[in-house]
Image (tube, grey):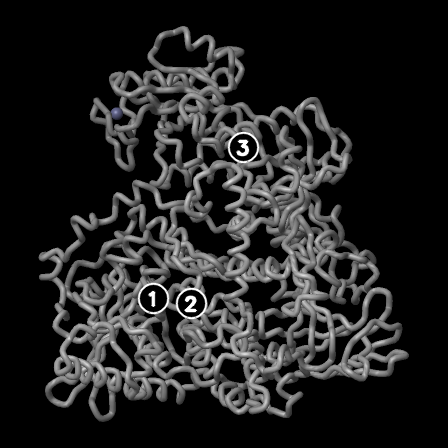
Amino acid sequence: MIKTEKVVHLRSGRGRRVRVVREHYLRERVPCFSALCQADCNNDGPVLPGDLTHYVVPDAEVVVNFLEILELRELQGIVFTQTAVQALQSRGRRCYNRLRSLVKDPRHDCVLFANEFQEFCFCPREEGERQERWQTRSVYSAAVWYYNHLAGVMNVVMITEDQEAVAQYSSLNSGVFVVTVQDYLQNFWPDLVQAQDLYRSISQVLQDKEGEDTQREFSEHLPPEVLESGIKSGRFLQGSLNVSKHRASDQAFVVNQVLSSKNTDLSGGVLVYGFKNRNRAVHGDSVVLELLPRSQWRGRLTALAEGPGTETGEDGEGRPVPTGRVVGILQRNWRDYVVTFPSRDGSQSQTRNSQRILAIPWDRRIPKIRISTQQAETLQDHRVVVRIDSWEITSLYPNGHSVRVLGRAGELETEVQTILIENGIHVPPFSDAQLREMPPNSPEKPWSVDPAQAGRRRDLRDQLVFSIDPPGCQDVDDTLSVRRLAGGKLELGVHIADVTHFVREGSLTDLEARTRATTYYLADRRYDMLPAVLSADLCSLLGGMDRYAMSVLWELDAGSLAVSSVWFGRTLVRSSYQLHYELAQALLDGEEAPVPELAQLGPEERDAKLAELLEALEMLTQVARHLRAQRDQGGALELEGVEVRAQLDQDRNITALVPRQPLEVHETVAECMIYANHWVARRIQEAFPSTALLRRHPPPCQELFTQLVDLAQARGFPMNTRTNKDLADSLERAADPQDPLVNRLLRMMATQAMSQAQYFCTGSQPQDQYYHYGLALDRYTHFTSPIRRYADVVVHRLLTAALELEGGAAPAPARALGGNKEMEETAQHINNKNRAAQRAQNLSTGLFQCLFFKDRDPQTDPRCLADAIIYAVRDNGVLVFVPEYGVKGPVYLRNREGQVVSAGPDGGCEWLSGSVRRHPDQISTCSNGGSCTFRLLDHVTVCISVLSTSCHPDTLKLELVSNRPHHSGAAPRPAPAPGRNQLVQEVVRLAQEAQQAQNQAQQRPRLSREEREFQQSKTPNLYSLLEEVRELALLDQDSLLRAAAATA
Ligand SMILES: [Zn+2]
């Protein structure tokens, strides 16, 4: 080892530059991390594959400025030199962390090379040499070393933006190609348009940086050490900036849980009033605040703004609340933003050949972003993904650059992609490397059971196992069995797809599934968590196929149904019947129903098999009734039961009134799954008291039930919300036989008041917090849907580890389980992704609703008229629910001109000048036309139209047409109304027609964009997709169903 000296320039916290001389040790052996290594390096960890066409070594400046391009997964074989990494590090932790996660992610082919420790690559900086020059020289030296180290068997390309270096080094004949980034992308990646676009937009920003304005618009942020001591001393507060959705330009709050628990004054958060006081902080940033003197405190704006985004400023303020201003930013939480390039109005500034456009983010909480572009013309009215680069003190707006064009605003595909990006949902096509991990399975050579595996599993193929799912279900997660044992016992079995057999911990498929955390269901499509070969085939417990399963088998006393023993383990099953709910229920009800699996048999054999199946179904029903009764005693919320039924409900009305009595078999299956989840939760919690992944549902906050209690009171139903049992009983009794919607609405309100169920790691919560309120169980987890939920995959691994531990195996590999902290991180990650999935689901439903109503004339189209029920009263109007379309929203009774809604003798409404008067459970308008009262739970007729803004999502507008219920046509309640399924179908059809017309015009192959871009499984018909969505209860915009899906 050789000792030398290295001069480093560091920047102190106050911005001073410090020159430090460090001892620097050089070694002969520094790992190269290449599979082609000829020198026996100690390459511990991932290595660059040997089958690439070249390795690329980016210069420090390239890494600093163009890291985003290097992050593209298509680019392979990147060698990051220590020199470049240190240059990046000096730019702050955020950049550095990005690089670290890039290098750690096995889906990217890139490695770190410690060139400055390598004896033969290290170049000491020369007297008077510019830092940039020295860095380029060091990186070049590293590239040359690399080329020689691999004995020239791999091409090595160095990329730099330094033209002089290109000229100088290219003439040296060292074997290394030195080219500019632009040349590199054009010659090596001509088809990677995204990289070239990114290059253009980033270089534009770099060019424009010179020649910025100089006038200050904001005050300087305080240095980090001042912020830190200010927080310590209590002079400053820290928290996350939360911009108000409806008052984005002037209202933001900073909430800090630690402080608000100490100081009740701050429990509502600190108001940051106005744009200037935000001092360049963006929604979501972690900021430091200074409280303003009391005389400058402002009030919250309380009245609901009419329509989102209309900020009139005429509303009164509430009493003054603590108000502050941002003095520093601890961490930026910038993400990818979707913006719209507005139509040209001449007000945008223009320089030489580029234009600076103020692009408008889709999310109202984000400020306008200034983008320099040469494509301003073509991008008008398009949605574009952008990233913020900086927010200079001299600029009113942050500067950013464009990353990718999504398409014209208002088109279905553009809008769907917008929703995904805005929710951080990234669903690229499954990569080839990932698909290579899949077991071989082709029509010629189908996958088959491995005899060695079969020997290690309990073989249940001779037992009657069956599934009950919605019709057409492809990914069968779960199957059931029940049989009589000798000695008067019963055996109940739940058999779940053995996903973890195929998805190894840490494999690329596992990483991708973990990143996604769930299958995403939008109104018209879904994005799978696992590749189709697993989700629809090898893992799916299809009828008549040998499949691996993870099973729970209970031995029950035939009389009392008490559990005498439980067995968990890996099994081999062959499902005999793939039943659907209606068929199973018909069989149970003694109806003649053809079972497809028996169609080919002779009558005698058929009757025998049918009798066997029927007996099993009946036994199962008995057991489930017993289990349900047990949970009811504990106070399980009937609400859940209802929603589980609704979830699984099939070809009933998709829209309005879901029958109060759904099929019992839904509940039977659900109950068995709940039971399996509960027992697995117990098992893994006992084995891993501090590292098990469970699911808890905290009890609701009582104040949130006020709206529910008031609403029930309007029909004279008492509502006791003290315990889950009381609530369940009250809801059961609160049914109006004349108006079934009332009960549905009350359950909706109840669910809205509920907290969401969440995953957690057992070590992070005291045991009394494990309780699942909705299901009335002391411990619960998710085990039964590993094909579409990553939590279940983790739980399968935990269960496997627990069984190995029990079997006397050495403690399971620590990696499989991770520590307490790691498991809690996993839990939070999955919770976050589930919330994103729900938001995306709701936004896509909203999108379809708006697209459906967009081109309709509310004056003439009868579908724009609908029945609505009032569920809350506000100062200037009411909130209504439109069951036919699942829409909720405000109906204004007073407009900005001071006019009020007045109803004539026939119920028809018009605007007249007058006044409104609000009472707790009703609101009255008074005008020349007389007075008119609207009570809670009244039915009225509304007209639905679209409030369109090109830059933000459209919203629906509800206007009162009549104060009477709406009856369309002759029948008092038309059977399946033009519900949401038709709505989605129609919107998709129109979009496809438009696409088709466009394709014909451009003579392009007719592949849907989804197929081209995502290669995701596209379920053949929309109806079956909708059924799946509904099964997860994600389609319904009611938070009722949402929360139920989340809590089950
Ligand atoms: Zn080597």
Residue at image x 37%, y 66%? Answer: 762
Q: Is there a contact, CB below 8 Å, between mark 1 and mark 3?
A: no
Quadrant the N terminus occupies? top left
Image coords of residue 1008 (percent x, y): 45, 46
Q: CA distance from mark 2 to mark 3?
A: 50 Å
Q: Nearer the viewer, residue 864 or 562?
A: 864
Look at the image and tell me in which quarter the C terminus lies: bottom left
Residue closest to the far right: 928
Residue farthest top in this picture: 171
Q: Quadrant holding ligand 1?
A: top left
Q: Amino acid at mark 1?
A: Gly
Q: Is residue 36 above or below residue 861?
A: above
> Would you name the residue on which mark 1 appears?
472
Q: Amino acid at mark 3?
A: Arg
Which is more N-terminal, label 3 or label 2?
A: 3
**For this view, does 937 lie left or right of residue 416?**
right
Task: Name the residue located 41 percent from the left edge and 19 percent from the top edge.
Answer: 158
Label 3 sits on a secondary structure element that is: loop
x, y (%) of residue 342? 69, 41
Mark closest to the chain's N terminus, 1 or 3: 3
Q: Residue 352 falls in which quadrant of the image? A: top right
Q: Left of 105 or right of it: where is 203?
A: right
Which residue shows up at 33% across the image and 82% down it? 585
**Residue 303 position (above or below residue 934):** above
Estimate how packed mark 1 is, as few (under 14), some (14 to 19) or many (20 or more) residues with alpha carbons within 10 Å.
Answer: few
Closer mark to the observer between disc 2 and disc 3: 2
Please name the residue shown 65% across and 48% down the image.
366
Determine crowd level at label 3: few under 14, some 14-19, many 20+ residues with C-alpha closer than 10 A. few
Q: Which residue is mark 2?
A: 1027
- Where does the image place residue 361, in percent across and percent down from the top left? 64, 46
Instruction: Report how far apart the C-alphas of labels 1 and 2 lie in the structure.
Output: 9 Å
Residue 91's tag is: 3
